[in-house]
Image: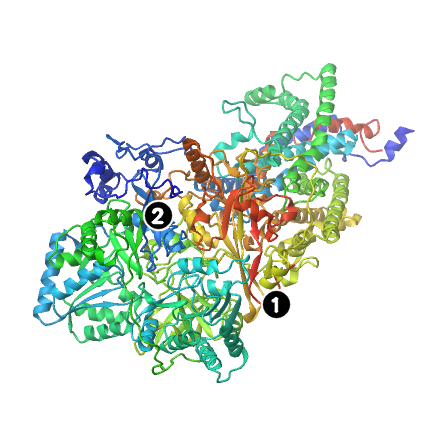
């Protein structure tokens, strides 16, 4: 009975793959020389990264004044980028951990790259709290290390201190989870390695994986535990990031809707970024049979859901501002929609509210080009959402004498480009040097196909 | 903070002078000499950074700066034999007098390690009465200006005094031989000794005369009194006695004549507990600080003001009159003998009208004192016109210019320049190079008043003393010494003054002291009351009415800027960055146009327009000024000064930096060439102009760009059209109900236990919005006290100015009915501060005495605290702002850390002053009394608007104010529990005009 149902289900892996072809497909990418297309992508990413390194070095040597910030708008691009990148990371963890716990087998072809994307995004994100400090060479003071000055601890009440723990935990657990999940695949690469160096490196990296039953058993247990550990992070990390704003007193920030709003927004933008990356990757590396249209469709459905939550949050904010009768709160929202930064607000609304609505239509969901374009719009919209939240709330808050405008400086824009550079450089290196699809897990879900592993 | 007078005089060396050998030994003199000598500075290492400076001061602060260059410390010499009275690290106070403007405020100079670092008003001095204006507060940095003249210059080369003296005397003798005039051109000389020596000098060189003029001219007032009362005098104005004040354009609370004294006196008649307070009506064409404070304000063009004065005259004499003129006349009649009518307009017709009105009201002898006149201004415009004519005709053989800058000040500057080039001997006395010194072949460097000896009688009957608080930094000589030297008298600076008074003091002294006693008291107290040189005036004579040349149509109004005055302080970076109280403009002057006029001309703010008057023109950016007459373009004087090119690259260096000045530019534009003469009187207003667009724009570095509490039209929320931060009421309403004007908010209840039990002290502050005139003395005082950096025009434009204290200026109403409210805003030291919980590294914490403390060396600069502050009072060091100009750094207060880049700073409620007072009280074993601690801002305020004290002391002034129904907090509903409160503004007017301050 179950088998019959299984045979009706859409196959997760197309193209009559068997165990051997899967290994060849995935590891084969790493054996081949990188294509011209890869080089183009890598070099663009690397130059963006270089620009970013130059900008950040200049800024650290000269001062935060090289950004467009002022005494009214103390955060702009720096924290926008921070929240943006952390948000993007959440998709990967959701796919890796939460979908695992929910036994969603379709996650298997995308979870490795999504989790890698998470780690790179969190690395990008983690840079910003450090470089946005006026004195980043004292950044280690944010950590509660024992000292002889009292001892002088950090302020545990501060959301920025919570960020340290949240981002730190997130990075560590994501990295551990990703890495441990990757060990069997690294062992596969080791076994297939032709050169001595490659064998040595991947041998070291796979920690002597033997592939025995006991090892696999332990692996599954650890994997499950790590998934369990990582799953709550999807909700908690961005909740804590949202506390950077929610716990403050500024109208536009001071709101309890932020934790669910931000988490939903994070998943929303994260999935959009996953789609952007994987739509390119599957085309460029010919992995359409692994990352199928179904996978894309499923991700767009998540986008509809989370986009809907984001829309609901916007509406709730507006409603509560009106209902509260609090003039400052009402002003912030009117100012967002019709004040000097209205252009940013409407970009945000247009991209975030309208774009997901297209995904109601199967025709669009299954059109890879449309999905790609829409995913980029979603990311633009989500970046602007953080920008609007931060800058419009700050630039006109309580006292009108302090109202000021904000314009980004070249250094800030270069830093933003640099963060994309870092992300894409790492991702480019990842797809070149690491198994981008979880070989073991994909093989696992081949069982959905008939006894022969192929379509009936 | 100066020790209270009960403690003063105990251990303070009375006189700092290298001649008084019995105070210190030769070794100590050499020590003091080695602290700062200009010759040494030239050869000193240029890498003397902050750490060495602090070491020199005898401190060892924990090193908070990384990457400091280690240079050998070669100037830190401790006393070999320390004088008993001097304790390193303790401040010593010397009474002196300020010469920053012409008013002569008595100051107490705070000396640390033989360096003056702060000025405070002498509470006993009749002019300053404890307060000081922003110009005076800022003048202390001009002492440490490395661009000052430190050596005499002859024909462009530095020479010794002997050489210069010889050359000058030769020139004077030659002029005498050639039968040419010798002219000494100075500002009003207020020093009796200098006047005496000048007389001697003039006698020695026959055919020599002394011409006095004031760059901001009061000549018309003096001339009018000559016509009406027979003597050319400037009256003393008693604002305290005036129950009604009618001012025609006189910015007496801001820049006119003696603003600190006038503010103090004005405030005395604004006591809300009294039966009535003064009624102040301001008639003006531009919006001034005084107009902002007035109970009623009438906007008129300059010609309109004169017409109104004439109409009031008519109404007073019963010859009819209608409209406002008759209303005002009625009120004035009600206050007969207790009113005061003043005008700053240098128009003979206006001043004569004012005299007639004051006479008709019987104010003379009561609020207008003629018998003991004001000696602050005695310049004569007519004599300047005569001089210019003489110079042109080649009659002048030697011109000595002291204390004025005629090439800049006078509209005939160009003609003056040409004439000067033909004069064989030109001598200039100046502290810095300026437009006039450039044309002089002999330049005598003048000392700063903080390193000078001088006696001055600014108001008849008060002799003010100026004593040096530091050994002269350069090879400078006062005018007095040079002139006496050239007259053949040789004596040192101090003795020239002392010996003069020794000779004549019996004729002027009050009391029966010996001279030495009398002199010591004079120097110790900074002033002494002497027998006034009474002037006998004739009875009022009507005299011929002068013609008015005030034009109709669009006219120019040139007003002295509150920061620059006539331009003498243009090289002072603190003053350049001080925002104009009304426009909030820094580093520039602008063409102020009313909104209606700007619309009519089709220009908007920042557009550069060309103003043309009688063939001359100037280009200035537009600033839209509310409350200004539609027929006037108002521009402030004091800009476009040579010497300001030094600010070209002022400010931090980075890739998108916009230089403060373009190539060859100066800060702002000079407009003096557009001024006209009405007969001889220099006219500052009513000059016909035409305006044309240039198509260019110029950024205005404003510290405030949103000017009202009203929310913008298109984004105004339905439940709050106006933000309720200013509470206002009228005097009548206040008398009926003291809590009128208050926004009755909800009492915020909290379930949390109070985190901070304040056992000992709980410091609090209250600011009286009715008293604050917006003069910004507090802003500069705070800057001086707390080493707040100056950031430059571009940074101000980017809204990154660093002033810990700002004065928010909010308009309400529209058109001519505009009301202005000033709200000084600094860290509110909230008990429940939003900034404290969000700092990740605990760099901002709450003290056990109620202060919110910023720990500079812990701050990593995440700026969350600034974001979370609802009052936006925190300042971030975006770059390394502090300068390493060796001489300029001497003005730094060693009690306050100089912050590095990346660190947040804000008002600390002068914690160093609080601690100093507590320590002193503890050391003496006496309890701390209310009023012992005076914060820098509070101390300087001429309006006494700021009260500070211990909230835990039920008898303290602040505790009483907290109970006052006028007391409120800004944003009380946020439950941040600020300890800084405000008092409702009370205006003496009939109905609530505009009423836009209420929610």
Q: CA distance from mark 1 to mark 2?
A: 43 Å
Q: Which residue is mark 2?
A: B108
Seen from the viewer's position, the closer of residues B671 and A125 is B671
Q: Chain of mark 2?
A: B
The disc, 1 or 2, on the residue closer to the chain's N-terminal end is 2
A436 shown above or below A183: below
B263 shown above or below A301: below
A175 shown above or below A356: above
Q: Which residue is mark 1?
A: B991
Callout 2 environment at 10 Å: few (<14), some (14 to 19), or many (20+)? Answer: many
Quadrant of the image for the N terminus of chain B?
A: top left
Measuring from the top left, give residue B51's x and y in whole percent: 35, 34
Seen from the viewer's position, the closer of residues A98 and A170 is A170
Measuring from the top left, give residue B280's x and y in whole percent: 50, 66
Image side of residue B908 versus residue B359, left or right? right
Can residue B649 be seen here? The reply is no
Measuring from the top left, give residue B925's x and y in whole percent: 43, 31
Furthest-bottom residue in view? B319
Measuring from the top left, give residue B504's x and y in whole percent: 20, 57
Look at 77% across and 26% down and name the residue there: A444
SS at badge 2: strand
Seen from the viewer's position, the closer of residues B586 and B950 is B950
Numbered-mark total: 2
Furthest-left residue in view? B177
Image side of residue B645 versus residue A405, left or right? left
SS at badge 1: loop
Can residue A288 be seen here? The reply is yes
């Amino acid at each position: 009975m179950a088998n019959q149902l299984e045979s009706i289900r859409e196959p997760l892996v197309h193209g009559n793959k068997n165990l051997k072809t899967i290994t060849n497909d995935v590891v084969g990418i790493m054996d081949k020389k990188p294509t011209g297309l890869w080089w183009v992508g890598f070099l663009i990413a690397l130059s963006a990264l270089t620009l970013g390194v130059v900008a950040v070095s200049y800024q650290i040597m000269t001062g935060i004044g090289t950004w467009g910030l002022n005494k009214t708008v103390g955060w702009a691009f720096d924290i926008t980028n921070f929240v943006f990148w952390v948000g993007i990371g959440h998709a990967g963890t959701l796919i890796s951990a939460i979908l695992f716990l929910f036994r969603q087998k379709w996650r298997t072809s995308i979870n490795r790259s999504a989790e890698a994307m998470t780690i790179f995004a969190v690395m990008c994100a983690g840079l910003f709290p450090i470089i946005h400090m006026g004195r980043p060479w004292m950044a280690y003071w944010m950590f509660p290390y024992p000292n002889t000055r009292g001892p002088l601890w950090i302020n545990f009440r501060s959301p920025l201190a919570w960020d340290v723990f949240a981002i730190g935990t997130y990075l560590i657990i994501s990295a551990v989870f990703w890495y441990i999940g990757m060990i069997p695949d690294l062992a596969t690469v080791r076994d297939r390695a032709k050169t001595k160096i490659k064998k040595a490196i991947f041998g070291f990296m796979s920690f002597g994986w033997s592939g025995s039953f006991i090892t696999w058993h332990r692996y599954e247990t650890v994997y499950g535990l790590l998934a369990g550990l990582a799953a709550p992070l999807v909700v908690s990390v961005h909740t804590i990031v949202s506390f950077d704003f929610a716990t403050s007193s500024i109208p536009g920030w001071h709101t309890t809707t932020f934790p669910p709003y931000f988490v939903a927004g994070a998943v929303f933008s994260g999935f959009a970024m996953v789609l952007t990356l994987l739509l390119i990757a599957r085309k460029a590396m010919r992995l359409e049979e692994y990352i199928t249209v179904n996978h894309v469709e499923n991700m767009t459905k998540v986008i509809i859901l989370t986009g809907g939550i984001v829309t609901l949050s916007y509406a709730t904010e507006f409603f509560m501002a009106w209902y509260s009768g609090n003039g400052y709160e009402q002003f912030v929202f009117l100012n967002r929609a019709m004040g000097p930064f209205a252009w940013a607000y409407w970009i945000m609304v247009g991209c975030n509210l309208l774009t997901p609505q297209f995904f109601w239509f199967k025709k669009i969901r299954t059109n890879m080009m449309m999905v790609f374009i829409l995913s980029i719009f979603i990311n633009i919209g989500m970046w602007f959402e953080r920008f609007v939240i931060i800058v419009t709330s700050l630039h006109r808050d309580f006292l009108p004498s302090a109202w000021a405008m904000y314009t980004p400086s070249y250094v800030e824009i270069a830093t933003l480009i640099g963060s994309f550079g870092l992300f894409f450089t790492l991702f480019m290196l990842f797809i070149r040097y690491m198994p981008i699809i979880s070989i073991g897990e994909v093989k696992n879900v081949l069982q959905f196909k008939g006894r022969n592993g192929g379509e009936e | 903070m100066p020790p209270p007078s009960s403690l003063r005089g105990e251990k303070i060396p009375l006189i700092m002078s290298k001649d008084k050998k019995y105070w210190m030994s030769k070794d100590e003199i050499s020590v003091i000499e080695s602290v700062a000598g200009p010759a040494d500075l030239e050869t000193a290492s240029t890498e003397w950074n902050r750490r060495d400076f602090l070491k020199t001061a005898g401190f060892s602060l924990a090193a908070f700066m990384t990457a400091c260059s280690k240079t050998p410390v070669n100037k830190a010499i401790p006393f070999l034999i320390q004088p008993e009275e001097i304790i390193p690290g303790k401040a010593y106070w010397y009474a002196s007098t300020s010469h920053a403007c012409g008013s002569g405020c008595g100051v107490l100079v705070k000396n640390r390690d033989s360096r003056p670092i702060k000025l405070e008003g002498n509470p006993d001095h009749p002019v300053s009465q404890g307060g000081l204006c922003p110009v005076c507060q800022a003048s202390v940095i001009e002492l440490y200006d490395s661009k000052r003249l430190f050596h005499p210059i002859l024909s462009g080369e530095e020479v010794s005094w002997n050489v210069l003296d010889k050359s000058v005397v030769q020139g004077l003798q030659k002029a005498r031989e050639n039968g040419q005039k010798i002219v000494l051109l100075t500002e009003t000389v207020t020093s009796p000794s200098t006047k005496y020596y000048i007389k001697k000098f003039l006698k020695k060189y026959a055919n020599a005369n002394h011409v006095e003029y004031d760059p901001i001219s009061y000549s018309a007032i003096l001339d009018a009194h000559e016509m009406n009362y027979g003597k050319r005098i400037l009256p003393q104005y008693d604002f305290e006695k005036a129950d009604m004040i009618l001012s025609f354009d006189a910015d007496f609370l801001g820049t006119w004549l003696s603003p600190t004294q006038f503010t103090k006196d004005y405030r005395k008649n604004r006591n809300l507990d009294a039966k009535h307070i003064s009624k102040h009506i301001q008639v003006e064409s531009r919006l001034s600080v005084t107009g902002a404070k007035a109970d009623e304000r009438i906007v008129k063009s300059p010609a309109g003001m004169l017409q109104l004065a004439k109409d009031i005259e008519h109404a007073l004499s019963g010859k009819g009159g209608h409209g406002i003129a008759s209303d005002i006349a009625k009120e004035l009649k009600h206050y007969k003998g207790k009113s005061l009518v003043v005008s700053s307009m240098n128009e003979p017709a206006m001043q004569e009208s004012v005299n007639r009105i004051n006479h008709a009201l019987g104010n003379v002898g009561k609020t207008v004192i003629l018998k003991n006149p004001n000696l602050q201004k005695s310049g004569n415009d007519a004599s300047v016109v005569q001089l210019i004519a003489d110079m042109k005709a080649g009659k002048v053989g030697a011109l000595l210019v002291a204390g004025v800058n005629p090439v800049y000040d006078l509209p005939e500057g160009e003609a003056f320049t040409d004439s000067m080039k033909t004069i064989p001997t030109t001598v200039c006395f100046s502290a810095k190079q300026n437009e006039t010194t450039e044309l002089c072949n002999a330049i005598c460097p003048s000392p700063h008043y903080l390193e000078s000896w001088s006696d001055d009688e600014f108001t008849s009957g008060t002799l003010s003393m100026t004593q040096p608080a530091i050994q002269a930094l350069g090879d400078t000589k006062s005018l007095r010494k040079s002139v006496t030297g050239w007259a053949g008298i040789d004596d040192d600076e101090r003795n020239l003054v002392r010996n003069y008074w020794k000779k004549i003091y019996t004729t002027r002294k009050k009391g029966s002291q010996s001279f030495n006693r009398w002199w010591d008291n004079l120097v110790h107290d900074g002033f002494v009351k002497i027998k006034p040189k009474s002037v006998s005036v004739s009875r009022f004579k009507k005299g011929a009415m002068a013609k008015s040349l005030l034009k109709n149509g669009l006219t120019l109004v040139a007003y002295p800027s509150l920061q620059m005055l006539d331009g003498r302080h243009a090289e002072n970076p603190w003053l350049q960055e001080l925002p104009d109280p009304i426009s909030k403009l820094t580093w520039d002057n602008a063409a102020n146009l009313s909104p209606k006029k700007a619309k009519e001309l089709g220009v908007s703010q920042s557009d550069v327009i060309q103003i043309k008057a009688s063939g001359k023109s100037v280009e200035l950016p537009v600033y839209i000024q509310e409350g200004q007459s539609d027929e006037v373009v108002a521009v402030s004087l004091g800009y476009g000064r040579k010497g300001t090119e030094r600010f070209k690259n002022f400010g931090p260096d980075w890739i998108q930096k916009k230089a403060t000045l373009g190539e060859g530019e100066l800060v702002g534009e000079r407009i003096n060439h557009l001024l006209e003469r009405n007969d001889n009187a220099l006219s500052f207003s009513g000059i016909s102009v035409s305006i044309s667009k240039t198509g260019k724009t110029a950024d205005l570095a404003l510290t405030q760009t949103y000017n009202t509490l009203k929310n913008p039209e298109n984004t105004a929320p339905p439940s709050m059209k106006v933000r309720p931060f200013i509470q206002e009421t009228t005097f009548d309403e206040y008398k009926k109900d003291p809590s009128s004007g208050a926004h009755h908010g909800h009492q915020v209840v909290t379930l949390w236990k109070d985190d901070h039990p304040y056992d000992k002290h709980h410091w609090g502050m209250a600011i009286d919005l009715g008293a604050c005139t917006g003069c910004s003395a507090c802003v500069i005082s705070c800057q001086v006290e707390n080493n707040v950096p100056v950031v430059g025009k571009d940074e101000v434009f980017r809204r990154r100015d660093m002033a810990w204290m700002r004065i928010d200026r909010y308009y309400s109403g529209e058109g001519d009915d505009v009301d202005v409210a000033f709200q000084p805003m600094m860290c509110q030291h909230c008990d429940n501060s939003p900034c404290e919980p969000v700092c990740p590294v605990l760099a901002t914490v709450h003290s056990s005495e109620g202060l919110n403390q910023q720990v500079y060396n812990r701050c990593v600069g995440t700026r969350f605290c600034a974001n979370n502050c609802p009052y936006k009072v925190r300042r971030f060091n975006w770059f390394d702002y502090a300068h390493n100009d060796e001489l300029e750094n001497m003005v730094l207060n060693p009690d306050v850390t100089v912050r590095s880049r990346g660190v947040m700073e804000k008002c600390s409620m002068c914690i160093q002053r609080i601690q100093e007072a507590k320590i002193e009280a503890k050391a003496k074993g006496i309890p701390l009394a209310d009023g012992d601690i005076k914060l820098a801002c509070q101390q300087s305020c001429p309006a006494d608007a700021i009260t500070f004290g211990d909230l835990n002391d039920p008898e303290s002034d602040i505790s009483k104010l907290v109970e006052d129904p006028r007391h409120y907090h800004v944003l009380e509903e946020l439950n941040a529990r600020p300890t800084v409160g405000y008092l409702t503004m009370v205006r003496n007017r009939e109905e609530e005009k505009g009423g836009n301050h209420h929610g």
